[in-house]
Image (tube, helix red, strand yellow):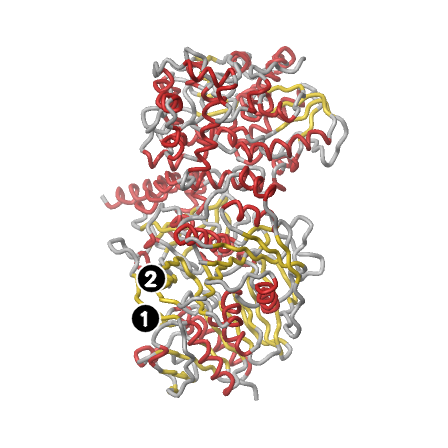
Amino acid sequence: MATVASPHPPGAFEITLENLFSFPQGRRVLTCLQCGTCTATCPYGVGMQYPPRRIIGMLRTGQLEKVLTSDSLLSCVACYACTAKCPRGIELTTVLLPLLKEQMLLSLPEVPSELQRALENMLRYGNPMGESPRKRAAWAKTSSIPIRILPEDPRTTDVLWFVECYTSYHPRGQDTARATAKIFQALGIDFAILGNEEKCAGECVRLSGEPGLHNTLMEYNMQVFRKYKFNSIVTSCPHAYDAFRYSYRTAGFDYELRLATTFLAQHLEALRPMLRGKAGYTVTYHDSCCMGRHNGFYEEPRTLLQAIPGIKLVEMTHNRVNTICCGGGGGGMWLDTYYKAKGYERLSERRVKEAVATGADVLAVACPYEISRFEDAVKVLGYDKRMIVRDITELLVESMEGEI
Amino acid sequence: MKIVVLLKMVPDVVEELEIAPDGKSLDTTYLRMILNDSDNHALEEALLLKERHGGKVCLLAPDAPEVDDALFAALAKGADRAVKIAGIDAAEGTRAVVARIVQALSTADLLPADLILTGAQAIDDLDGLVAPLLAQTLRWSHLSVVNQVRFDASTGVTTVTKEFPGGLRAEFEIKLPAVLGIQSAEKPPRYVPVAKVRAAMKSLQIDSTTVPIAAGMPALEIQSMAKPSAAGHAEMLEGLPEAVAGKLCDVLAAHGLL
Amino acid sequence: MSGNIWVVAALCRGRLLDATYEAVALGRELAENLGTKLEVLLLGHELKDVLGTLGIADAVLCVEHAALADPVPEVHAHVVARLAGTRHPQAILVPQTNVTWELGSLVAGELGVPYVNSCTELRMVEQTLEAHTVLYGGKVEAIVRTKHAPSIFGLVSGVRAVEKGYADHAPATERITEVDVQPTSVQLRRYLEPEAGDIDISKEEVLVGVGRGIETRDNLEVSKELADVLGGAICGSRPVIDQGWLPLSRQVGKSGATVKPKLYIAAGISGAPEHVEGMKGSGLIIAINSDPQAPIFQVAHYGIVAKLLDVLPALTEAIRSRSRRGMKQYA
């Protein structure tokens, strides 16, 4: 399979606020109609002092200072809704907002402590939770499938599995890791992980306004990649996928790349006969912003779910390009307290309400951020008797093991 | 206002600490060093004072693994100069280290200064606290467990707030120069974007000074080190949340608490 | 004959802090061990009110001087050092409260004698004083020995039970009024009371203490609900207070309140010594933490390794349903 084509021209990551208008993507900002679609589609647009439409207006009239010293941009959860809906094709989430957020982070008198801690942890420990880097592959010891760890066994591998932070450390993420390993083994995939040498890819870091930290993580991970021989990279995290697909290009990333979900969808014909257990439940699937709106993977997860015998898939009102963000992107994962103080509704709760309204028993996800966010929302809203949250890989393994 | 901030690297307890085969020191195989938390607060308090009253913030730190990262981050936050004291052995006693600091203050040309700020304590303090010992040696005023430093430029009066038990605080007037052991800064230590740290690494440099070890300052000798024994360990309750909750209820009931 | 054991009393606004009695209890054992006397060193001004509970000691050396009225560490330390220079105690025990924080280091510095920080245990082994100390936030215990007399020992809070050092009578008292007062450039101006209007957590019988493991402010709610069904209150460790999630009046630990409720539930509290010293005297301690290595499990009577959001609501519900059942029985 050929490496994916980047929708961004190579220069996209060389744009700065100063040279913005010398790039086509930058000049496109000047074509803004001030129609307000971006603000209307923004999940936190109502609460922002300077919502996207105003920001563009102020940028054009040279009043950016006010935007950069306000905390409006912290409300951007990098959900790509404004970018997807803009009639002029202005790349807000991918180009303009990260540039502004970078300046904001330099000007803000105080960074919300939760976000600050996550960023500091990411730099020091390579994960936002501040967990020990030495314990990154600790989950592998709890896996029933032997997991090859490259630093210990550096032979060439077909697939380098980039596990990522939440899948490595979060107890529910580890469930996904173990499930993924089981499927890989059943499919006869030759795979290995980087173990303690892996660090966060840093996509959320860049989109929360810390490109320097993103670059540090990128340079580090690229060095680690170059140490080993493998044919392709598969990652469990859409955010890592996104970073590798776009920003890591600037550091020479040209490996064959797939997201675990799309990788498994490609192996569906081999997988299908193994899916023996009949599912007696109804499932609804949440499109991750990063995976769907920004990378266009809408059908692969649904195809996998529908391959489970007896499963009934129902759609939420907002699906595919209209999905509602879980609130975890662009640093939102570490701004829950800040949003709460602002009086914002939690986006994960908004989403779970919609999922429950479908009557589904299971909310299926494919992004490791979402399990913890949605499980929390399900509990907070008191729906824990009505709905469970599962990663697609977990549902596949249940069917493979006939445990339904 | 001229402020010197003493920074110290200490073992990072996020990584599991292991005892070396000699049974009396830490195994350094996986040991990582991190800036002592209350020293980070001392730095923040110094930066706040500089922002309010102008002046210079100079950093002085015993050389240690990863100290350069901490010093560049502090420079990027707004400190003006950083000096490392080369060749200090981690096993030197606090008093020997303080004697070296006193010499380094001169050799690195950091005196006169109005204030020396450092953390009220470090997690590896075994045989003394730096702030009081340094004040004693320099014959400067001193207070520790400080959580606020205020300078009134019109009267030249410095007031320092010290934490007491029970949420009580005491406000002291203190004459400068003074050494203060900071417990916590008025605001949490600020964030510094990595790009700024990288820029500091490119444009700034860390000075180094060498001072001889002071004679006649024996350190305490550690006989043995161990991780706390499991003897005093809690009885662990296991199971699913509902099952654990049930067991806990039994415990509470047995203690007459339900 | 060996010198006496001294305990330097920790006084805050004319009131003895509990750490003093804890030090007295340990000092008593040490003095028996060595066949020597235990003396409490009381520094201040107009001190008679506090003598009546120090009877576990053999004597109180009551050093009274107007210059000692306020807790200026360098002034107090100089007086202790001078007295030690003439009376030759074998060991000086200093409880490490925020009031006496600097004292041990300063006295040792002035006398040029060894100081051991954060001691949890002291005993005589082979004619040598052996101290157990905690390092690295309680992650490691170290043993050191010192033959020097005097040696100075800073004691972490909770080295012994307060009751063991508490008496209802005064010991023999020696008043010392001739003291060498060192001039100082540190003056106490005033005390700042903690923010009023809140409950006094030291008077609560049930406390749910929350720590950094609570992760977000939202999770405070589940802790509050638990405290509510138990008829108690919520309190926190320093990070939670620093975060602004709870007022300063709810802080437990070295800089906050020392609490001894019948029940203390430590939710997401790792167990840093600064926090533990404020709650280890609690009747029943239950710790919930996602890290099985958290030091709080060394202190707790019962422990659960789990996510707070899993266990706290389940526990709240379980307690509710039991109380309901209980009520039915009586109905």
Instruction: Name the quadrant containing residue B109.
Output: bottom right
* Residue ID at (34%, 27%): A50
Which part of the image, by quadrant, shows the N terminus of chain C? bottom right
Q: Which residue is mark 1?
A: C13
Which of the chains bears the disc numbered 1? C
* Residue ID at (37%, 54%): C251
Name the mark on residue A228.
Answer: none
Callout 1 touching callout 2 (CB < 8 Å): yes
- Residue A43 visible (yes or no): no
Q: Is C124 above or below relative to A52?
A: below
Which part of the image, by quadrant, shows the C terminus of chain C? top left
Q: Is A327 above or below relative to C191?
A: above
Amino acid type shown at disc 1: Arg
Taking the image as shown, residue C236 lies to the left or right of residue A245, namely left
Residue neighbourhood size for the residue with mark 1, other residues' Cα within 10 Å, grouped as few (<14), some (14–19), many (≥20): few
Query: Front-most of A59 and C257?
Result: A59
* Residue ID at (47%, 81%): C38
Residue B119 x, y percent position in the rendering: 49, 58
Residue B185 x, y percent position in the rendering: 42, 53
**Tags 1 and 2 both on a single chain:** no
Amino acid type shown at disc 2: Leu
Residue C129 x, y percent position in the rendering: 59, 75
Instruction: Name the quadrant containing residue A185.
Output: top right
Q: Secondary structure at mark 2?
A: loop
Q: Which residue is mark 2?
A: B168
Q: Is C80 above or below relative to A276?
A: below
Instruction: Name the quadrant containing residue A317.
Output: top left
Query: Front-most of A373 and B35?
Result: B35
The CA distance from mark 1 to mark 2 is 10 Å
